[in-house]
Image (cartoon, rainbow, N blue to C red):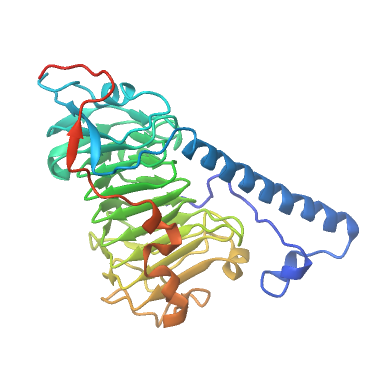
Amino acid sequence: MRTCMRGACGRRPYIKHHLQRYNPRYYYNYNYYYYYYIFILFDNILLSFIFYALIMASSSSSAAPTDPSTAVLIRVDQSGQGNYEKIQDAIDAVPSNNSEFVYIWVKPGTYREKIVVPADKPYITLSGNQANDTIITWNDGDHIYDNPTVSVLASNFVGRYLTFENTYGARGKGVALRVAGDKAAFYGCRMLSYQDTLLDDVGRHYYKNCYIEGATDFIFGNAASLFERSHIHSVIEVGKGALTAQKRETPWENTGFIFLGCKITGKGVGTADLGRPWGAHSRVIYTLSYLSNVVSPDGWNNWGDSKKESNVVYGEYKCYGPGANRAKRVTWSKGLTNEEATPFLSKDMIGGRAWLRPAPTKFKKGFSVNSHL
């Protein structure tokens, strides 16, 4: 297990009116330090604002479709009986700044491809029939942004009944899926790797009935994400791993990982922490979830930096199972009250009621695609 952070060493202090709530040890009375740290603070706020503006611009760059029940249908079939034999070719056929719902149906098979859904191609659904027989796999690693098997950069993306796999193994970081677009949802999908399986990068995301497997930090990033009724499985073989490494950097970011009604299991050999902080204000909450004995008794890890303990938001609410006993939990994690847990018991944190959409029931021909049918 790694002992260093992903280029996120150090932490950012806060101005005077936040002293009592946030760590006062990092406020300095000397003018030099005062203005220096104010500069860092507002620099961070500016970067967050710019990122938000870019997401909004990307989301609104094309006219939003209004009828989610109808979509343009594209078929992918390795045998040549569909519109395309490769998934990437089907994605490439979608026009830039697309303004229609697009449903790419992938026939069962193992697709050895490295796939990118570009930022200028929103409203795509990529769907198989069953996750265990429709597999997208690649073998590349070490660089988390350049080498994922599948990278979703577009907004309003939906993945259904697919396996995203990276077979890089224990050699290093092997991202199976990177999600960096806003308003992305995944249903009945599997994400398989060893280290850094799911880069839940930025944006608002929803995962339902998914299976996510790995050993070290295998759900990580700074998205605002809800994992509902999903199965999180640790394959750590010796020592201790970590399920999550969330990267929230400031208390003003509305990001974090919420696990609602999930199941946490493992091989039964090594143990796993529920999370450790990639960012100084990392936020991870487990609610109404089953925790097996793979969960370590202390539950959480400060990643070698005790200064973060006063800033992270690590909580559990009405979890059950042999790993849910909080008697030996680290003192800086929290068992939530009913009132404290309420914001994390629905889709409200990700604003999901406004953008989650059902699968289409009607299909049509749209922009020009290859036709072998």
Residue at the spot x=32%, y=56% of the render? Answer: 238
Q: Is residue 365 left or right of residue 79?
A: right
The location of residue 342, given as percent across then percent down, is 42, 75
The location of residue 44, given as percent across then percent down, is 67, 49
Which of these two is toward me, 104 or 141? 104
Residue at the spot x=63%, y=65% of the render? Answer: 307
| Count of numbered marks | 0
The location of residue 280, given as percent across then percent down, is 59, 58
- The answer to whether 119 is drawn above or below residue 348 in the figure is above
Which of these two is toward me, 171 or 165? 165
Which of these two is toward me, 354 or 228? 354
The quarter of the picture where residue 228 lies is: bottom left
For this orientation, the residue located farthest to the front is 66
Q: Is residue 334 left or right of residue 253?
A: left
- The answer to whether 357 is drawn above or below residue 312 in the figure is above
Image quadrant containing the C terminus: top left
